[in-house]
Amino acid sequence: MDYATELRLIRANLGENPADESTHLIDDDTLKIWLDERDGSSNWATHKALLTIAMSEALLSKKITTQDLSTDGPAVAASLMKLADYYKAQADTEAGETYFAAYVADEVGRRREAEERRVYGGIEWF
């Protein structure tokens, strides 16, 4: 796998300058791990990166309005997660995967929600 090309693509997807490390929010080693996890899928690695950034935004930023300035961390996080969904759908389409929402019982019989997966393949998802 050509990591350099895939990393440049991921960085471009994230709106970062691939050549300027000061714009990188996630290090190359982490992105390489995510690339390896899904056989080099840059869309899937972009999805993971956006979820990580959204989680950080949601945890660190708050909705604040003072005088003429305002920030809305939760809204930014929601937008990033929606964009992450787009890259997840692209990655799933590339891999030919179809997922669904399900419930599974753990060892003590309690129900817990399994990872939600949407069905793609011609269905508009957002």
Image (tube, rainbow, N blue to C red):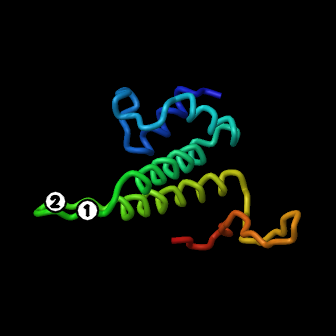
Q: Which residue is mark 2?
A: 69
Residues under numbered marks 1 and 2 in contact, where contact means CB atoms less than 8 Å apart: yes
Residue at 69% across, 39% down: 37
46 left or right of 106 in image: left
Residue at 65% across, 57% down: 93
Residue at 58% across, 28% down: 3
Q: Is residue 124 above or below residue 63?
A: below
- Residue closer to the observer: 73 or 126: 73
Give percent across and percent down for residue 102. Answer: 76, 71
Mark 1 vs 2, N-terminal side: 1
99 left or right of 80 in image: right
Q: Nearer the viewer, mark 1 or mark 2?
A: 1
Name the amino acid type tagged 1. Ile
Q: Residues within 10 Å of mark 1 (few under 14, many from 20)?
A: few
Which of the labelled discs sits on residue 77, or is there none? none
Q: Is residue 1 above or below residue 41?
A: above
Name the amino acid type tagged 2. Leu
Residue lying farthest to the front in this orientation? 108
Q: Which residue is mark 1?
A: 64
Give percent across and percent down for residue 55. Answer: 48, 53
Residue 117 occupies quadrant = bottom right
Q: Residues within 10 Å of mark 2 (few under 14, many from 20)?
A: few
Q: Secondary structure at mark 1?
A: strand
Give percent across and percent down for residue 125. Answer: 56, 71
Give percent across and percent down for residue 100. Answer: 73, 69
Q: Which of the image's four quarters has the N terminus? A: top right
